[in-house]
Image (spheres, rainbow, N blue to C red):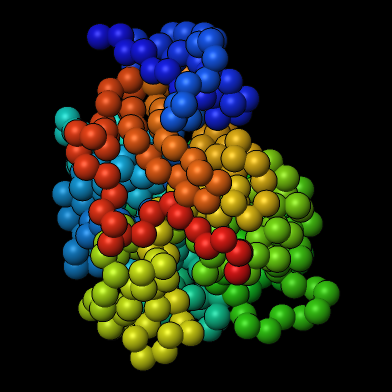
Amino acid sequence: MAVEIAGLHYRTGSPVRVRLDRGRIVSVRPAGRPARGMPWIAPGLVDLQVNGFAGGDFNGPRADGEAAEKVSGELARHGVTAFFPTVVTAGVEAIEEALRAIDSACRRRGAARDAVAGIHLEGPFLSPEEGPRGAHDPAHVRAPEWNLLERWRRASGGRLRILTMSPEWPGSPEFIARCVRAGVLVALGHTAASPEQIRQAVEAGARLSTHLGNGSHLLLRRHSNYLWEQLAEDRLWASAIADGFHLPHAVLKVILRMKGPRAILVSDSVRLAGMPPGTYETAVGGKVVLTPEGRLHLERNPELLAGSALPLVRGVARLAASGLGTLAEAWDRASRGPAELLGLPSAKGLVPGAPGDLAVFSWDGRAVRILRTYRRGTLVFDEERDGGVPPNVTSGRVPARPT
């Protein structure tokens, strides 16, 4: 059944009527003069890095076949129409089981089948060094091994689309080239690689820096280091966590300036994202505290973050509210940009022929409030029908002054 949506085009601010039919946008027409309170319409958000959300977890003992379905439904409340469940460093069998669970969920009829665009494997081929390794379990960090990756690709049902690895291991260029030939996008992250190793990785086909600026040593060489090298490499895209806690305002500004349209946003959310503030027990880190502002830190040391606990829309709001881009630019970094990098059809944007993946929202200059979300032309979240984000769960509002 055809659906028509009226609102302000997120790029032009002009009133439009978007018509959806059979899962696609069939027309985008002018809609006269803007009406008071008219919402905005934009392509749905695309999150390349979701470890978990609202209690659903793709890692550890909580990971099961229901996580993808639960997370898909919860992310719709925050305007996300496509995402990549992210499996992190663990034992060989644990990774295989997690991948099989996601694939199984995607084969069934339900939200996961429409929302999961692929799987992101973050590890275990990461740096073994303290700092760059981050919170990844050192017991399972290992050198790249093609037969192992092939085993995991089969377990994922061919859905493994992104691999984050460090190119500091011997044979990394050859391994990366093989991944590229197999259709896996290689991202550099959690790395202590030398500038030369990074250059070789890019020559072999690596295309992305994962959460650039995080997962690194506290102190680096002044000139020759892996952050400068990735920033200066024009062939590398860069993802960033713009939740206001993982990167200082100035660092985020530099990444956006250096990478231009190839800078994209990710949430890197964990299972506690989208949950009420409080103290929680986790498998990694023990007791953690989720503040009302959405900052997740270790109870024993508030200076140490315990992951990201805010949805992707928070990063969009932060960029637009802090002057790091217009609303349209910020939104594209979390929607069309990631889609373009992964070759998803939603990269077309708000045009006829594009998928009917849309977010309808309000914007007051500081907060994005998702009103409705459509996946493949079907209404999957309606604030009036389903209830909005509870007031005790942080969503899109950002402080008046950036930190």
Give the percent coordinates (x, y) of residue 13.
59, 26
| Viewer-side residue, 98 vs 168 | 98
- Residue lying at the far bottom of the rendered structure: 300
Residue 373 vs 188, above or below: the answer is: above
| Residue occupying the point 76% across, 63% down | 229
| Residue occupying the point 49% across, 75% down | 134
- Residue lying at the far right of the rendered structure: 223
Give the percent coordinates (x, y) of residue 76.
31, 40
| Viewer-side residue, 67 vs 384 | 384
| Residue occupying the point 46% across, 82% down | 304
Residue 247 vs 231, above or below: the answer is: below
| Residue 319 seen | yes
> Left or right: 246 with respect to 83?
right
- Residue lying at the far front of the rendered structure: 36
| Residue occupying the point 33% across, 28% down | 375
Numbered-mark total: 0
Q: Could you say which quadrant of the image residue 219 lies in?
A: bottom right
> Left or right: 298 with respect to 259?
left
Give the percent coordinates (x, y) of residue 35.
48, 21
Instruction: Locate the C terminus and report the quarter of the image it occupies.
Output: bottom right
| Residue 271 seen | no
Give the percent coordinates (x, y) of residue 278.
26, 74
Instruction: Locate the N terminus and report the quarter of the image it occupies.
Output: top left
| Viewer-side residue, 163 vs 241 | 241
Residue 71 vs 303, above or below: the answer is: above
> Left or right: 385 with respect to 367?
left
